Each structure stands twice: as structure tokens, then as C-alpha cells.
Amino acid sequence: MYLQKNNKNIEFLDPKKALELYELDIFTLGKIADSIRQDYFGKKVFFNSNRHINPTNACADICKFCGFSAHRKNPHSYTMDKGQVLKIARDSIQAGALELHIVGAHNPNLNLEWYLDLFRTLKAEFPEIHIKALTAAEVNFLSQLSGKTYEEVLRLMAENGVDSMPGGGAEIFDEEIRAFICKGKVDSTNWLKIHSLWHSLGKKSNATMLFGHIESREHRIDHLLRLYHTQEKSGGFNAFIPLVYQKENNFLKVENFPSGQEILKTIAISRILLPNIPHIKAYWATLGLNLALVAQEFGADDIDGTIQKEAIQSASGSKSANGILKNELVAQIKDAGFLPVERDSLYNEIRTYT
Ligand code: V47
């Protein structure tokens, strides 16, 4: 067996050894990842009822891979006022959302107090709703804008109603690739520091990796191992989400896209290298529903949720703009031979669909 006891991944802490996993054939690799996944969760596939809200796309940064923020290829800049966000929240909660996933762009016109007031207002009206909000990149931006330390910004987020942090903004930790694809964004060390600080408040978060663009397999391994080591210390990552790069409406020139096999291998290796992060999420918005379901046989155990509206990946070509109905998600998970489990944002099980 590849894993040591107590979730320690001693064998693969050596990046060279970890990289060799890619040389295994897809079925061998899949079997190893699947055995870990089955040990942890059997046939369960987790999903949730959520709603993505993106209050603004006006961004002070230009990330080459981003088709969401307003720029030459996406000239429609918008910024919602609080009333608009509240209306979306009301409607989506009425439609069944249990989680609001609120992330946007680095907009100098929306300061920290604007967000804190929004979270406070949402929590006052909907005390039960789970607010998953602000990526580490936004925390970094709001810290610079407000002159407050990361610790202060995070404490204020927690005090004003943010329950957990999403995993966005991690991209690829390798400094050289990062400087090319998203210069000016939070650096890797600070991305990891912000999550560790959040965890030290007793809070949970997720982690992502954007792959399938100009990075190499070595860069992915480096990314995963940095997450592994951070999690060993802080312990607050709930899920790891490998995001497949979508190519439209952005400035990143990519010629070779990963094959289905390369994507599945990357998901399987994530499961093997991150035994200390409970969940591997095959985010259907970047994989497509079919591949996200196949990924459940290659180490993933989560597929994300109903989303209702999706603006970031769909801006670059994915077919996720209108989310997916819960019944449809449940039926597809069942048809793929798994047990659909609706979870809350912290992975407490709400309902199993037998
Ligand atoms: O950080 C931007 C990515 C992320 C593209 O925590 C792109 O549960 C693919 O982090 N192709 C934001 N990806 C989304 C995100 C997320 C999504 C779902 C669930 C959770 C969670 C987090 O989207 C960004 C960036 O890495 N992204 N552009 C693109 N062209």
C-alpha cells in the first residue's frame, strides 16, 4: 500500500518519487487512488446546494487566464450594489441554497467595510446560511486597501459572518509560472499564510490548483506538496479542488491542453499526495459532469454543487453558467453507480439518496 498509517505520506514527500506516479498507467494509478477514496468514503459522492455570487468583475489585476474580470476581451464591467446582492441571496435561498459562495474581483471601489456590512446584513436576515467568501487573493487585496494586517482582516471576516473561505486564487504556487500568469496577485507564501491564519481561528477553507495551461507536471507536484506541508501544520483544509484551465476570452496562449487521462492522473495523484486533506473535489464546472463523475473512480469524492449561476469558468468557455438542478445531479451520481450524499459546507451529511 502506498500510504503510511495516520495519514502520513512519507514515501511521496520526495518530489522525484511523487513525480514518478505520473509514469504509472492510468488504471494502476486510478486503483491506488480509488482504494484510498473507498477507505475514506466508500461509494459516497458529496454535493451541496449552493449559489455563487460575484458582486463585481472590475479588477485592479489582470490575470492572463481570467475571462471573468472586465478587460479588452470582456468589456462589460459591472459592480452590484448591496441591494442587488441581497436580492440574489434571497432568491437563491428560497430556491434551496444552503451556502452562498461570494467571490469577486479586486475592485478598489468595494472596500473592506462594504464586504463586512454585506456579510453582517446577510447573516442578520439569514442566520442559518453558510457564507463561504473571499479568496486569499481578495483578503490580500483588502488588507492592502484597508491598511489592516491579514490577521485583522480575517478576524473581522469571522466576526461579521464569514463561515469558511473558498480555495480560489492559489493558481500555481511556483513563483516563475505565477509571475507570468498572474503577476501582482497574492504571492504563494502569503496565499498559504492567509489560509493558515484563518485555520488558527478555528475556521475551515478549501484549496485549489489551476492546471492544464503552461505549468509542468513538476509544478503540480510542487503545488500539492506545499499544500500537504501547510495542512500538516494548520489542519484546516477541507477539500482540494484541481481546476482544469478553460481557454476562451483570456490572454494566456496555450497550445497543448491536457488529455482526459492527464486530468484523471492529476486528480488521482492529488488523492495520493494529500491524504491529510479529507476531500478531493472534481468540480463539474471545469471538468464537465461526465468527466467529474468518472473522476469519482480516480480518487475524487465530491463534485461541488448546484451553483445556480456560475460566472468565472463559464466566462472562459465551460458550460456551467446556469448551474444544475439538484434532481439532475442526484440522478447522474446514481447512474454512475455511486451514492449521492448532500452535505453542508463543512461536510456534515444532510441527506443520503438511496
Ligand atoms: O482562483 C479563473 C479559476 C478560481 C479560469 O472553494 C479559472 O469550494 C479555469 O476557486 N479556467 C475561482 N479556472 C473558482 C474557485 C472555486 C470554484 C468552486 C469551488 C471552490 C471552493 C472554489 O477559478 C480562480 C482561478 O483559479 N479560474 N479563470 C479559467 N480560465
Image (spheres, rainbow, N blue to C red):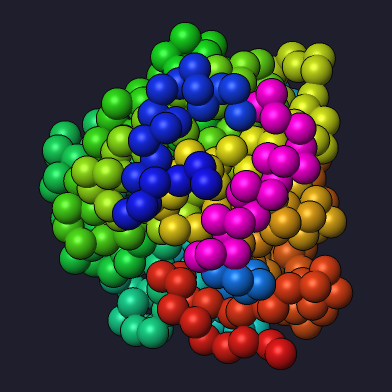
Q: Is residue 81 above or below residue 86?
A: above
Whether residue 290 is visible: yes
Horizontal side of residue 292 vs 49, given as left or right:
right
Give the quarter of the image for residue 352. Answer: bottom right
Front residue of 187/257: it is 257
Query: Residue 239's spot in the image, x, y percent?
Result: 47, 55
Query: Residue 155's spot in the image, x, y percent?
Result: 16, 55
* Boundaries of the magenta span: 22-40
What residue is shown at x 33% (from left), y 66% (from top)? Answer: 163
Q: Is residue 299 above or below residue 122?
A: above
Horizontal side of residue 43 vs 192, given as left or right:
right
Query: Residue 144's spot in the image, x, y percent?
Result: 25, 31
Whether residue 55 is visible: no
What residue is shown at x 41% (from left), y 22% (from top)? Answer: 14
Give the quarter of the image for residue 305. Answer: bottom right
Residue situated furthest front in the rendering:
1
Horizontal side of residue 85 vs 311, given as left or right:
left
Q: Is residue 231 above or below residue 158?
A: above
**Residue 157 painted magenta:** no
What residue is shown at x 76% (from left), y 16% (from top)? Answer: 254
**Residue 26 painted magenta:** yes
Query: Residue 177's spot in the image, x, y percent?
Result: 52, 14
Front residue of 195/8: it is 8
Horizontal side of residue 155 vs 217, given as left or right:
left
Main secondary-structure element of the magenta-colored stretch: helix
